[in-house]
Amino acid sequence: TAERERARLHARGAMTSAAAIELLLRPGVRPYLALGLPASAAPADVRKAFRRMSLLVHPDRSDDPRATMAFQRLNGFYEAASRAAQQPAAASSAASPATSASTAASRPYKPPKRRAPPPQPTAREAEADARAKAREEAEERAAAEAAREAAERAE
């Protein structure tokens, strides 16, 4: 599919920033596919792929307005892939080998929870802001009027 081809391009370092953002924001993309890795990748490979991809989509390095959202999604993919990459080691040391990397990688991606919006100003703060704005506008009008009068006197 097109996603697999983009993942292969990314793995070879031939992916552009726009293509990386497009891949990350596509619905239903799995973490390993987004990072350009096989499901059996080691934690070090996951980390390396994340760093390479983060250079492409980091909001400070990309002018694309969707870069922030793509970078947040990349972080979620990295966490999911890291967890899945570390589970085989934990499963082999545990008594039950039922958990494997393929079951961990097949879990659906859960985006991080959104933060609460900043608190709205209180009525008192809003009134103070309105008074300060009105004061600034009155001062600007007075300065413009004084400049106009000075220009008339100079004529």
Image: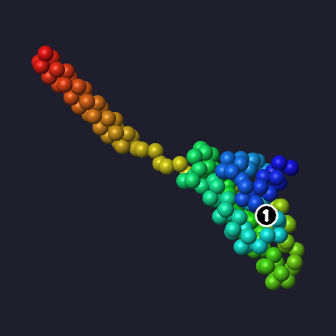
Q: Residue at x 77, y 55 (%)?
A: 9
Give the SS element for disc 1: loop
Q: Is residue 47 above or below residue 123?
A: below
Compared with residue 154, is residue 85 higher up or lower down, i.e. above or below? below
Q: Residue furthest left?
A: 153
Q: Which amino acid type corresponds to the residue marked 1 in the rendered image?
A: Leu
Report x, y in % for residue 65.
Answer: 59, 44
Residue 100 position by quadrant = bottom right
Q: Residue at x 67, y 62 (%)?
A: 52
Q: Residue 19 at what x, y percent from top left?
A: 71, 48
Question: Between residues 87 and 53, which one lies in front from this camera angle?
Answer: 53
**Colour style of the rendered protein structure:** rainbow
Task: Give the number of callouts.
Answer: 1
Residue 53, x across and y down, in percent: 67, 59
Q: Nearer the viewer, residue 123 or 104?
A: 104
Q: Is residue 21 left or right of residue 96?
A: left
Q: Residues within 10 Å of mark 1 (few under 14, many from 20)?
A: many
Identify the residue at horizontal 65%, vertical 64% (top origin): 51
Where is residue 79 shown, x and y percent of the image?
A: 69, 65
Q: Locate the C terminus and report the quarter of the image it occupies.
A: top left
For the question of whether residue 31 can be seen, the reply is: no
Q: Nearer the viewer, residue 62 or 123?
A: 62
Determine which residue is flagged by label 1.
Answer: 37
Q: In the figure, is residue 48 to the left or right of 102?
A: left
- Can residue 59 be seen from the camera position used here? yes
Q: Residue shown at 40%/44% (left/top)?
A: 122
Instruction: Name the quadrant containing residue 58.
Output: bottom right
